[in-house]
């Protein structure tokens, strides 16, 4: 796809292809991998504003980063403007110049709490949240969906409101909350919102190849694309989208495992890398047998050995 730099507030991204926030996946090692393969920006998984306020250790772990990773955006969720502003000002968020507010999460527990996609139904509160978070001095961005269901699409109105409140970039997932992750992406909604605002707009939904990314850009006029599920199956999708050289899958896996070991305990490494390996073999010959062995593996060394067998032979 056509690469262009994007400016968000006073930060310039090297290109307009970004890794989405993915709860349970976009931890430090995974983001570092995607960045190395060309992603112009990566987002942490969503982090609870309340979790930060009450000092949840688990929440703080989600915000691990270092200089090797470089520029990264943190994503937070919640519905209390003061708590979310305090989250932006939290010491664990200090390394992230950009903070994204989640206004799209469809998970029932989050929605019922009035957080994530529930904010689409309360644009005045959404606006207050952005205004309050902007006061923290962070560059504030918003990721949202086109509405709750197809009978009431709110994209353009909501985009204008978020821009007015001080957001520096919008990411629009072109599906309603009711569609979760399935179904067609509504290009028209994204296009109309893009035309209505001056800040950059990133389009999200259904990018699994370079052709998909080009189509999404062409149909919506967006400034860039965000890739989510495709990166789980193959982080090197960013190589295809940005022209970055690829590497052997085993080398990729080994690198990710090493970085995960650097920052996580062994139990997490085993569970997480088993999950990742299962994604990476999708569609390969012998994948079913591999996965059976994989889920019996109890140590990082066993997992690496299995990975070597499937990708090096
Ligand atoms: C496992 C999983 C976890 C996700 N976690 C988040 C999240 O933490 N924050 C967020 O804004 N969106 C989250 N999403 C939504 C994605 O960022 C993205 O908007 C959605 O998957 C559509 O993009 P895609 O069609 O490229 O997958 C998640 C999606 C999946 C499948």
Image (spheres, rainbow, N blue to C red):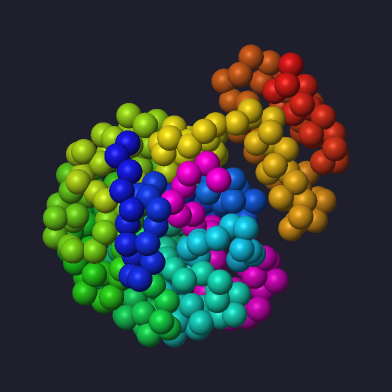
Say above or below: 148 vs 183.
Answer: below
Q: Is residue 38 magenta?
A: yes
Position of the C terminus, as image quadrant, is top right
Q: Is residue 305 left or right of residue 249?
A: right
Residue 229 visible here:
no
Above or below, 263 against 222 in this view is below
| Residue at horizontal 80 percent and vertical 56 percent from the top | 265
Residue range highlighted in magenta: 36-62
Expressed as whole percent of the image width and height from the top left, the position of residue 110 reads: 48, 62
Percent of width and height locating residue 80: 43, 79
35 or 285: nearer the viewer: 35
Please count the marks in the image: 0
Would you say 102 lies left or right of 291 here?
A: left
Residue at 25% from the left image edge and 41% from the top image edge: 217
On the image, the x and y values in percent for residue 234 come to 54, 34
Is 242 in the magenta? Answer: no
Q: Where is residue 117 in the image (x, y as percent from the top left)?
A: 37, 60
Residue 182 lies left or right of residue 54; in this view the side is: left
């Amino acid at each position: 796809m056509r690469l262009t730099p994007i400016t968000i507030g006073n930060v310039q991204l090297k290109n307009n292809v970004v890794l989405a926030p993915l709860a349970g996946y976009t931890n430090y090692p995974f983001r570092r991998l995607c960045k190395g393969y060309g992603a112009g920006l990566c987002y942490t998984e969503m982090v609870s504003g309340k979790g930060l306020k009450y000092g949840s250790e688990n929440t703080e772990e989600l915000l691990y980063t270092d200089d090797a990773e470089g520029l990264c955006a943190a994503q937070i969720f919640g519905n209390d403007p003061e708590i979310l502003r305090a989250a932006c000002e939290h010491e664990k968020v200090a390394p992230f110049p950009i903070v994204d507010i989640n206004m799209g999460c469809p998970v029932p527990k989050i929605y019922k709490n009035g957080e994530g996609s529930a904010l689409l139904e309360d644009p005045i509160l959404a606006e207050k949240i952005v205004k309050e978070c902007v006061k923290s001095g962070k560059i504030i961005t918003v990721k949202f969906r086109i509405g709750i269901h197809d009978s009431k699409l709110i994209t353009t109105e909501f985009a204008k409101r978020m821009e007015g409140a001080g957001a520096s970039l919008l990411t629009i997932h072109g599906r309603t909350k009711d569609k979760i992750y399935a179904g067609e992406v509504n290009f028209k909604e994204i296009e109309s919102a893009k035309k209505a605002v001056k800040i950059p707009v990133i389009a999200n939904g259904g990018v699994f190849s370079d052709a998909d990314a080009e189509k999404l850009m062409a149909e919506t006029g967006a400034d860039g694309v965000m890739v989510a599920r495709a990166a789980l199956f193959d982080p090197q999708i960013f190589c295809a989208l940005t022209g970055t050289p690829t590497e052997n899958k085993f080398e990729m896996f080994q690198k990710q495992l090493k970085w995960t070991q650097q920052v996580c305990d062994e139990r997490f490494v085993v569970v997480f890398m088993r999950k990742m390996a299962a994604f990476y073999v999708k569609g390969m010959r012998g994948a079913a047998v591999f996965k059976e062995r994989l889920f019996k593996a109890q140590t990082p060394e066993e997992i690496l050995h299995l990975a070597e067998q499937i990708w090096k032979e």
